[in-house]
Image: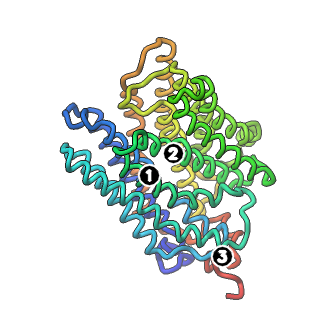
Amino acid sequence: MSDDDLNGSPWSSGSYIHLMLASVVMQFLFMLTAIWVGTNGEDFYESNLDDIRLALRMQLAMGWMMCLIAGLGFSLLPIIYDVKGFDKSVMRIYIGMNVSGQIAIILAILSGKEEIFNSLATVGITLLCGSLMILRNPAMTIIKNKKSEDKKLGPFSYSIGALMPIIGLIILGCWVLRNEISGLGDFAEDLVFEFFIPLTIGTVIISHFNRRLDWEIISPNNIGKVFAIYALLLLLALFSEPLVERDDISNRLSAILQFIPYMFFFIMLNPKKIISQIIEEMPHSKMVMAGVLWMPVIGFAGYMEAMSYVQTTDAMMSYQRWILIFGVAFQVLWGFAIYLHEDHKKVSIHVRKSKILILLSINIAVLITAYSMFTSWQNSKPIEQYPKIGIAMFTLSYLLILIYWLKETFFSLDNWYKTPMFYDKYLSNPKLGSGFDVED
């Protein structure tokens, strides 16, 4: 590790490496658990399917995926705003609670006993929600003490950190009261997957193209308006589903509301300018770019399912959500994480290699999934399971990312630097890191 690193540890610049490692290991265990549930025919899984499905999806959203989000955000925000980073003990506690929560949920599901499942799943989700709540103080510290505004990202920059504790509190309440108030479990899922995750994806995409690459795909003068409209559209889509169930709005209006947020955001990303930059062979993350191109398909899948043109079983995740998570969020987050890691290693953006096997495995899997959806539409037949070859390709991508981060964590940190390239321009004193003025 470089002499530029303080205290000989990547903790001095944040804990993204530790969070990435925790995330990649747990996402692989998540996939194995999901496969176990999908192939196990015991009565326990059939009779408790709704609760098992909710627990597993909460593990996905607030477990390894939230580790990714927290790792990226709390590594970069102190640098962007030039404030002292959080105490490393906070992130250690966060990792401990998050991973323990995920393990508790996995053990609950594998137990095969209803009483044990209810106890362990409640412990697991409480730990996951609690891990988000403890992030409130570092998030508020960064927001209150920031020395400058991030004009290239606007409200996108700090909104995710501010929302995390709120999301944790709401999800915990929904889980505890799910048997008392009908529909709370579905609301918890929808809140995370149809509002928080899409908002996070948008933040990461804009951060990569607008801030890191300086392509200015969205004007700084418009970034606040884009955030407000996108968040509002996501909320309208979120609440359209219960309104349809109450016959307050039509299926078609709900379908349109499912489609509009993703199409709006895709258009706001200025695809014409992005394509022109690609034609000019400007360096960028291929995984983040692929995620951008799948955005309209998320909206289209939501429209198709809201209109009942495509139907899946209750045990399955909707096509919209499947493509959102594994086709877009998965590769956007990991693509950004890999790009940031190479920034810490100060690898020139002109010689960086695309992780072609990871890129291909993810996008082939999404293509297979999208083809299955269109086939169902044409044949007017409901879908009972996702294509096994598509699931196999997703599993391969999980394994490849696991191998990549294990290699990077244990064998490739000799040339790691505390302050990543490009971001040092935000710091008053780059040698000391964030939160130190020149006179200090």
Q: Amino acid at mark 3?
A: Pro
Residue drawn at x 71%, y 57% is 154
Q: Residues within 10 Å of mark 3 (few under 14, many from 20)?
A: many
Pick the residue in front: 181 or 414. Answer: 181
Observer-nearest residue: 57 or 268?
Answer: 57
Q: Are marks 2 and 1 in contact (CB under 8 Å)?
A: yes
SS assignment at label 3? loop
Q: Is residue 397 above or below residue 252?
A: below
Spatial CA span between label 2 and label 1: 9 Å
Amino acid under disc 2: Leu
Residue 132 at x, y = what percent?
46, 61
Q: Between 120 and 276, which is closer to the camera in this rendering?
A: 120
Which circle marks residue 141 in the picture?
none
Q: Mark 2 sits on what residue? A: 191
Image marks 2 and 3: residues in contact by CB distance under 8 Å: no
Tag 2 secondary structure: helix
What's the CA distance linking mark 3 and mark 1? 39 Å
Comparing labels 2 and 3, the label whose residue is closer to the camera: 2
Image-quadrant location for residue 299: top right
Q: Which residue is mark 3?
A: 430
For label 1, the residue is 171
**Crowding at mark 2 (Cα within 10 Å: few <14, some 14-19, many 20+):** some
Task: Classify 10 Å Cα crowding around label 1: few (below 14), some (14-19), many (20 and above).
Answer: many
Q: Residue at x 36, y 65 (%)?
A: 96
For the view shown, which residue lies furthest in the top direction? 379
| Lower position in the chain sequence, tag 2 or tag 1 | 1
Which amino acid type is marked by label 1?
Answer: Ile
Residue at 53% in and 33% down: 241
Up the image or down, 395 lies above or below 426; here it is above
The reply to whether residue 330 is visible in this rendering is: no
Q: Quadrant of the C terminus?
A: bottom right
